[in-house]
Image (cartoon, rainbow, N blue to C red):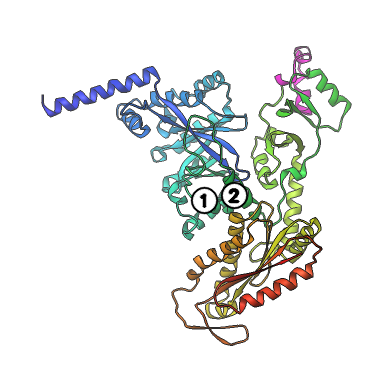
Amino acid sequence: MTQGMMDMGIQSEELLQFYDIIEKGSIYSVYQPIVSMQDGLVMGYEALIRGPKDSNFHSPLTMFQFAEQHGELYKLEQLTREKAIQGSILEHPQQLLFINISSHVLYDPGFVPGKTLEILQKYGLRPNNVVFEITERTSIEDFSLAQKILAHYRKQGYRIAIDDAGAGYSSMQAIAELQPDFIKIDRSLIQDIHINKVKEYILETFVTFAQKMNISLIAEGIEHVDELTKLARLGVHYAQGFLLGRPQADPATIQDSLKMLIWQQRKVQGGHMTWAIGDLKTPVKVFDKKVPISEVADYFKKNQESVGAVIVSEEEPVGLMMRDRLFQQLAGQYAFSLFWNRTIDNIMDDSPLIVDEFISVEQVSQMATSRSIHHLYDLVIITSSGKMAGIASIRAILESITNVRMESARVANPLTGLPGNLQINRELNKRIHESKPFHVVYADLDYFKWFNDRFGFQKGDQLIQYTADIMQQAISVCGTPLDFVGHVGGDDFIAISSTDEPELLCQEMIRRFEMGVQMFYEDEEWEYVWDRSGNKVKSEGVTLSLSLVVCTCESPISLEHISQTAAALKKKAKAYPGSIYYFQNIG
């Protein structure tokens, strides 16, 4: 047998194997979690297809390449969508299922929302649970046609994601033309972002753009804690990667330590003033989902000021009934007799905006205002540990954002944006009043005046901002959720923490400072620097002196006592060459 005949035999055997897989539907889905960078909870899953385990087609890349070569991509994609939906592990109606679709498939007459809708209904899902994640954007030749096709899907309730942004020009063009609901940031831009300033600046631009366009960012391929920390600090909305969870067939459990890190980082990022949506919650009338529509209508008639009611099942919110929408439903010629004795779950909105009490008001505002115009002013339902806690109106949300921004702008440090002296004093007084143990770290840069004189004010400002960054990063890694970082002024900072290991926190601040301060020196060399008094001192450059005041609160303490102790420790630290911390217990 010739080599050519052998190759043909192998090819035809592979083709038979491929058709057998399609006919028997012997592929399956695994699901990788996508995690919220506000609370560490699973927002949704990306469905990833796998072929039979003992087959040459176990790898999805091999399978899809083969299908495309033999003109069977549409059949394989259709089966892939069905398997993704069939095996779906969504745990509640707010979670999303991300399904990959090749841009080739967009133009396939067989790819119609109706078919996907049938499968969704069969397995108890809805279009608003599904995000079509578009891959292979380079093959989109007619963007105007793609826009029309995607607009058709959007009207059905589906959402759109652009995959691998940052991996090439095609993704930028696809974002501009298709205006997706989600942008997935490619691993190439995420890898080592905590030590690569260029990548950080590019991602900052993405974040600013996404905020203006009401688009959510998902960072892909996160494998290290430092990457996750940096992304949370930059304001990226969602995260995905092996660090958070590998693709699997069962619902994911995110490690508590990672949830805590995300939650801490969110609070530190809110070192400007921030409110959680739970701070705005107000009571609302609640009905069980099986009460008659007539009972809800009677309530609204007797309570003219009530704009809506929440529908629950065993204390968990499952729907919303807005007053106006109910009476519109009942206004038709036969609607009254048709609906009056049916249960409220037949006509309620079963996919309202439901948020956890710890999510920031700003994020809820973005989620609420990106809803369709018909639901823009619907109440936002707030939960605590999944149970009904209250509601917030759009008006209350927008008013609180305005108030917080005005207050932050008035009292925050203009260079770093960190809380200034007014908020620092408030925080210290609150801690003293609570009489629970806490720790105060005063940070001061040594030889900063020398640095400013030698390298200029712009570089000096950058070093101040860098110090603010490392303090916040150290707090996020070694601190607790309610820790605080403030900017006293100039090159002086303060951190207030309840960590069990305050010395470890100081060590982490020094480690991070020393790791990056060299980049500010522009490869210059010197042997001596000058202190604030003009004295010549042998030193390698700017160092960090920390005063750690451990407040045990076993006896009364005052602001003055803390300040005097910190000043004495600072004097000791500054007398020692290099970055160092000294500590003392009080109270």
Front one among 128 and 449: 449
Verify CB contact (< 8 Å) between mark 1 and mark 2: yes
Question: Which corner quadrant holds the N terminus?
Answer: top left
Image coordinates of residue 573 in percent, x first then y, are 62, 75
Mark 2 or mark 1, which is nearer the start of the sequence? 1
State left or right for residue 117 relative to residue 280. Answer: left
Q: How far apart are marks 1 and 2 (CA)?
A: 9 Å
* Residue sitting at x 76%, y 56%: 436
Q: Which kind of residue does numbered mark 1 sit on?
A: Val
Q: What stretch is highlighted in magenta?
A: 321-346
Taking the image as drawn, is residue 157 in sight? no
Label 1, on which residue? 225
Q: Quadrant of residue 536?
A: bottom right
Front one among 363 and 428: 428
From this viewpoint, which residue is outermost toward the right? 302
Mark seen at residue 261: 2
* Residue sitting at x 14%, y 28%: 4
Q: In this view, does 586 lie above or below 246?
A: below
Image coordinates of residue 172 in percent, x first then y, are 46, 47
Q: Which kind of residue does numbered mark 2 sit on?
A: Leu
Q: Is mark 1 on a helix, strand or loop?
A: helix
Mark seen at residue 407: none
Q: Does the magenta stretch include residue 330?
A: yes
Q: In this view, does 564 lie above or below 244?
A: below
Image coordinates of residue 155 in percent, x first then y, are 58, 29
